[in-house]
Image (tube, grey):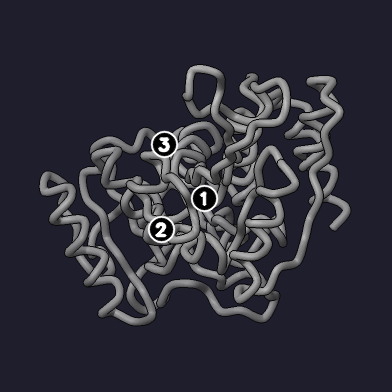
């Protein structure tokens, strides 16, 4: 996806994957910084760990409490921090600035893939871990009408609910399943990655006939059991490919300072996932 974006922009850049154990993350970031990488993406479990390793945090990372995109920046002749791609010559001072492009990608995918307008909508969110927390806070920021949080460990969901009540007092949030219908069910758990996984919700507590749309953050496999059952129940359904695409497109824009060529990136991503 990223390499297709670079090619469309005619940039002599390359996006590569590196497996980095959590205990080596600080050293890996320091190495990328020393080698003047334009930036890096981070996935679990690095998103939370990296927050304390950044020289600076963008408002997005501060708001959602996680870093999935790092941009390396240098000082220009006026002393202002600029993306390395925008500078000529080698700056003497470089910093790592952390961003979060996940949260905006979640809501953009919900709108574009499912036609959901989140303001005043009722949402059941499954999962209160790293991905679930970012999704819950973003949904609250979008002023959903009511947010239901369900997590295997109820105390974790309650802690998240308390945070939302403090930060977004106008949003109605509760822990547990809704008794009435909702506009959207969003799965932020890992249940569905394996074919033998159970559904991410208790079917004795909730039925998919209580919703009209289901969004599963999982994109591989392309169709989880949750999505199959959602479609069978007549729901609009989407996997996490849109979220993956939009967070990546935003990261490319942060590194290059140019608009992301979304369609070539989408086609490359679809081909990669189809061949997985």
Q: Position of residue 151 (x, y in %)?
A: 36, 74
Q: Position of residue 185 (x, y in %)?
A: 41, 55
Q: Residue at x 54, y 28 (%)?
A: 75
Q: Residue at x 37, y 67 (%)?
A: 128
Give the mark nearer the N terminus: 3 vs 2.
3
The CA span between labels 3 and 1 is: 16 Å
User: Up-down: is 83 above or below 146?
Assistant: above
Residue that mark 1 sits on: 234
Mark number, residue 209: 2
Contact between marks 3 and 1 (CB within 8 A): the answer is no
The CA span between labels 2 and 1 is: 8 Å
Mark number, residue 272: none
Quick check: can you spot residue 207?
A: yes
- How packed mark 1 is, by other alpha carbons closer than 10 Å (few <14, some 14-19, many 20 or more), is few
Q: Residue at x 59, y 29 (%)?
A: 83
- Of residues 10 and 218, the one nearer the viewer is 10
- How packed mark 3 is, by other alpha carbons closer than 10 Å (few <14, some 14-19, many 20 or more), is some
Q: Position of residue 84 (x, y in %)?
A: 65, 31
Locate residue 14 relative to residue 216 in the image: left or right. right
Locate residue 3 relative to residue 247 in the image: left or right. right
Contact between marks 2 and 1 (CB within 8 A): the answer is yes
Give the mark nearer the N terminus: 3 vs 1.
3
Quick check: can you spot residue 187?
A: no
Q: Residue at x 75, y 47 (%)?
A: 35
- How packed mark 2 is, by other alpha carbons closer than 10 Å (few <14, some 14-19, many 20 or more), is some
User: Looking at the figure, which quarter contains the C terminus?
Assistant: bottom right
Q: Position of residue 158 (x, y in %)?
A: 22, 72
Q: Residue furthest front?
A: 92
Residue that mark 3 sits on: 116
User: Looking at the figure, which quarter contains the N terminus?
Assistant: top right
| Helix, strand or loop under label 2 | helix
Q: Nearer the viewer, mark 3 or mark 1?
A: 3
């Amino acid at each position: 996806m990223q390499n297709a974006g670079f090619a469309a922009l005619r940039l002599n850049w390359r996006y590569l994957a590196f497996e980095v154990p959590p205990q080596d993350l600080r050293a890996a970031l320091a190495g990328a910084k020393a080698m003047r990488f334009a930036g890096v993406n981070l996935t679990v479990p690095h998103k939370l760990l990296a927050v304390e390793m950044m020289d600076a945090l963008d408002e997005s990372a501060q708001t959602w409490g996680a870093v999935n995109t790092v941009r390396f920046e240098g000082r220009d002749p006026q002393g202002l921090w600029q993306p390395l791609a925008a500078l000529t010559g080698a700056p003497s001072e470089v910093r790592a600035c952390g961003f979060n492009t996940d949260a905006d990608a979640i809501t953009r995918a919900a709108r574009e893939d499912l036609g959901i307008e989140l303001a005043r909508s009722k949402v059941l969110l499954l999962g209160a871990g790293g991905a679930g927390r970012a999704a819950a806070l973003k949904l609250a920021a979008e002023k959903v009408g009511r947010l239901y949080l369900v997590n295997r460990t109820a105390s974790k969901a309650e802690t998240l609910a308390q945070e939302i009540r403090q930060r977004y007092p106008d949003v109605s949030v509760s822990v547990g399943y809704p008794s009435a219908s909702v506009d959207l069910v969003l799965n932020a758990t890992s249940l569905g990655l394996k074919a033998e996984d159970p559904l991410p919700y208790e079917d004795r507590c909730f039925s998919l006939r209580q919703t009209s749309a289901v969004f599963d953050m999982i994109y591989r496999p392309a169709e989880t059991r949750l999505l199959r059952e959602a479609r069978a129940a007549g729901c609009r359904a989407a996997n996490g490919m849109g979220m993956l695409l939009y967070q990546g497109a935003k990261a490319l824009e942060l590194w290059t300072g140019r608009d992301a060529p979304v369609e070539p990136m989408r086609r490359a991503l679809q081909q990669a996932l189809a061949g997985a």
